[in-house]
Amino acid sequence: MHASSPRASAERAPSLPEPTRLAKMAISAYNTSLALDDEAVYLLTTNAAYRLVAGQPQQGIELDLGIGATLTQSAFIFWSKGAIWSAPKQGGVTRQLARFPHQLQYFVASGESFAWVDRSDDGLYTIQTLSGRRPRILVSFTGEISALNMIGELVYFVHRPTDGSWRIGSVRITGGEPAYSTERKGRTPAMLTGSDYIYYYDVDKSEIQKLLPDLHQEELQLEKFVCSPINVASRIYCGCVEGLFEVSKEDHKPRVLMHGRRGSITNIRSNSKLVAWTFDAGPEMLAVDMLPVVGLGDKAAAKP
């Protein structure tokens, strides 16, 4: 059964809030990422980090971020020229944290801690972190590791033991034995998200699932609804070709936030204050928009 149209199944409002445009740049929307803190939205491109605040000029820091950089509470973490680096988010001296000879895949962070996934030349996947100035392996597999997310001291990941199965695992950044969900068949989740629990979009079933800490129990949040990309903080946010949708964690009802605009949404990030997203605004053109979270759900859910 095909998923129903998000726009058709979501609650509609007579007038939707107008997003605030934070930036528009002549770069591809598909090689960037977003990060948030309590004060700003950060756009990470291959060669710079931009601090975006509504009503203020954008501030850029030239950095060789490449692909896969992340933001801790205080700094951008990235790989460049055979090493892992840290650059203060407010600007300042970039310092080398450790040597790492080849390009890794990407980083995830929680607080000041971070980890990354790497694939060696012979196909061995590892999740690693730093112990002092040395990389330390947390888990290693011959099967693919993807879709990392980090909550507190736990790194969550998707592992594909065989071509036809996958499972979600977790490992503490301090080390120890990993834990796993039961194996399942089908396509792997493209993303793991969440700041309290793990959420993911099951593309085969068109379902949003919440994974409980034991990794064996799930709570269905919404079914027959397209949600890719997905981001979850205080609320669930879904991007699709129709636009941007909010799903309440309480009533699990989707609400339209933005629809009918040209361009695919490529990234979504949110916290308790705002939701921001990037979208493809044309050939080699990216735009970043945002909406406040406070009162957003009530306004978007208003009846005609």
Image (cartoon, rainbow, N blue to C red):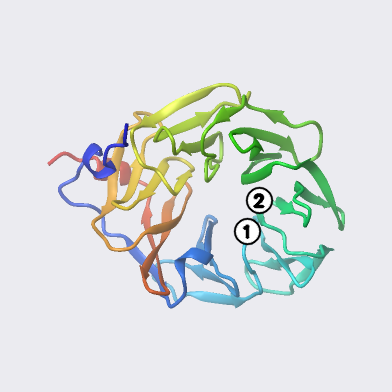
Q: Residue furthest front?
A: 163
- Give the spatial CA distance, label 2 vs label 1: 7 Å
Disc ID at residue 109: 2
Viewed as shown, does residue 163 lie left or right of 289? right
Viewed as shown, does residue 183 lie left or right of 210? right
Q: Residue at x 42, y 40 (%)?
A: 235
| Residue 263 quadrant | bottom left
Circle 1: element type: strand
Can residue 296 be spotted in the picture?
Answer: yes
Question: Percent x, y for residue 290?
Answer: 38, 59
Q: Residue at x 36, y 59 (%)?
A: 264
The image quadrant where one finds the C terminus is: top left
Question: Percent x, y for residue 50?
Answer: 53, 71
Count of numbered circles in the view: 2
Mark 2 and mark 1 lie on one chain; the one further toward the N terminus is 1
Question: Percent x, y for residue 193?
Answer: 53, 42
102 and 238: which one is in front?
102
Circle 2: element type: strand
Crowding around mark 1 (Cα neighbors within 10 Å: few <14, some 14 to 19, many 20+) is many
Q: Amino acid at mark 1?
A: Leu
Q: Residue at x 39, y 43 (%)?
A: 227
Q: Are marks 2 and 1 in contact (CB under 8 Å)?
A: yes
Query: Relative to residue 48, is residue 233 depicted above or below?
Result: above
Q: Amino acid at mark 2?
A: Ala
Query: Relative to residue 122, is residue 223 depicted above or below?
Result: above
Query: Relative to residue 44, is residue 295 depicted above or below?
Result: above
Disc ID at residue 71: 1
Question: Percent x, y for residue 255?
Answer: 28, 41
